[in-house]
Amino acid sequence: MSQVATASGVRAAYRELANAQKSGAGVPWYMRAVNRRLGRAIAAVAAQGRFTPNHMTAASFASFLGGTALLVTVEPGAVMAIASMLLLQLGFAFDSADGQLARLRGGGSAAGEWLDHVVDSGRHLLFHLAVLVGLYRFTDVSDAVLLVPLGFGLVSTVRFFAQILAEQLARRDPVAGPDSVPRFGTWIQAPADTGLLNLVVLLWPLTTGFLWAYGVMGLLNALLLAATLVRRHRELAALAKTPA
């Protein structure tokens, strides 16, 4: 395949994905404005070869593991923090690319969707465990401070599970469509934006600054979890009362 033909195919695939993009209602800013575009570009390039959505999922997890490995094995520093952040953001972009590549290939499979969710659930917890280990190894913070990543990890994992399970339970009559998203949902969801959390890693060499930014995001995510549990329970309870 010529370079001209490949470039043309990438542009055509990118335009096709842009026209078939999912609704941005309630989607956090970085995820919508940056990550989806990066994932779209990766998917458009991958579509020119024999890559599958599962390859994108595997690349996502590999890049994520590289970013978290730096947090737990390398002494905090500016170069290390930038490298970790870039690997985490690349993994996040590949996470977007798997679904977009599936759409280009005519739709994904149940197995592929399952694998994507399993990897996502692991990623949500492993990031905070990496923060915990990194703080323990390279800083002299108190034991009480080490409870912050444990709490953040619990909040992040439970909220992800609550969102995914609600969507699955209401698959035939979705409760997670644009009409159910609260007003200003994009900004309300900002603390749960993985891309913004990855950017906080840039503060890793500045322990106090990192802990303040990370801790505030953890607190806001706890508030989001409480709101999510109330909202999803009400929606599913209302759905159960709807006549078939």
Image (cartoon, rainbow, N blue to C red):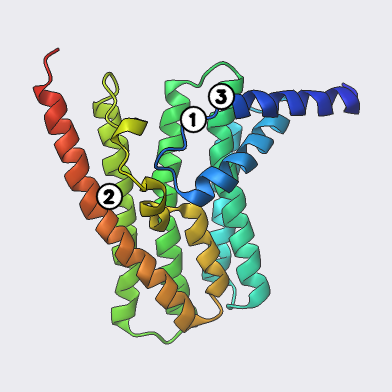
The image quadrant of residue 170 is top left
Q: Secondary structure at mark 1?
A: loop
N-terminal label among 3 and 2: 3
N-terminal label among 2 and 1: 1
Q: Disc 3 versus disc 2: distance between alpha carbons?
A: 30 Å
**236 or 65, nearer to the observer:** 236
Q: Secondary structure at mark 3?
A: loop
**3 or 184, nearer to the observer:** 184
The residue depicted at 42 percent of the width and 22 percent of the height is 110
The percent position of residue 185, horizontal first and vertical second, equals: 36, 46
Mark 2 nearby-residue class (10 Å; few <14, some 14–19, many ≥20): some
The percent position of residue 40, horizontal first and vertical second, equals: 63, 35
Q: Amino acid at mark 3?
A: Ala
Above or below, comparing residue 22 to residue 160 in the picture: above
Spot the residue most to the front: 183
Q: Which residue is mark 3?
A: 20
The residue depicted at 55 percent of the width and 39 percent of the height is 96
The image quadrant of residue 168 is top left
Q: Amino acid at mark 2?
A: Val
The percent position of residue 200, horizontal first and vertical second, equals: 51, 67
Q: Which circle marks residue 158 in the picture?
A: 2
Q: Which circle marks residue 22 in the picture?
A: 1
